[in-house]
Image: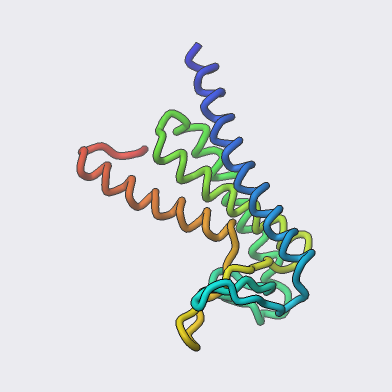
Amino acid sequence: MVAVRLAIMLSRWLALSTLVVLFDQISKLLIVNKFTYLESVTVLSTFDLARLHNAGAAFSFLSEAGGMQRWLFTAIAIIASVSITLLLKKHAQEWLFSLALSLILGGALGNLIDRFTYGYVIDFLLFHWNEHYFPAFNLADSAITCGAGLMIWESFMEKKNGSAVS
């Protein structure tokens, strides 16, 4: 009975990750179909939609590395996704921790699909203040960031309550 309950909980967390991947990929498909590379449109005075390609990691880290980064970041994403799935299986009953892991997993897989398919990640959300631009990102990046923030919050909650995830 406990094993069945845990399997159901795990399937719900994996379903959330799948939704993140679907929303991410649909949003990128819409951008690819509506914008040419480097094309943008101003939505607000501080926000543009733009089609950009990121061959590197966060903030275009290693984007000029000559192609090796595609396979390096693909391998890292696969290893991270397997590790996160194992953590989800172990901690499926821990709501906040599993929510964070599910968002990170969905984001990692969304960007992995891009990197494997195109050799780069499609970014399209571009915030700026006058001539100062924040690096462009996408829904997968947002899910990863939200998941990481929830993990940090959860770690503070553990310290406050005197418990720890093992």
Q: Is residue 26 above or below residue 71?
A: above
Residue visible at 23% across and 45% down in the picture: 159
Residue that sits furthest to the front in the current view: 44
Q: Position of residue 35 (x, y in %)?
A: 75, 71
Q: Position of residue 17 (x, y in %)?
A: 59, 42
Is residue 131 visible from the viewing direction of this image?
yes
Quadrant position of residue 14: top right
Q: Position of residue 73 (x, y in %)?
A: 64, 63
Residue visible at 51% across and 78% down in the picture: 45
Is residue 134 visible from the viewing direction of this image?
no
Q: Name the side, left or right, on which 67 lies relative to 15.
A: right
Q: Name the side, left or right, on which 160 lies relative to 72.
A: left
Q: Quadrant of the C terminus?
A: top left
Total numbered badges shown on the rendered structure: 0
Q: Position of residue 48 (x, y in %)?
A: 58, 74
Residue visible at 65% across and 73% down in the picture: 50
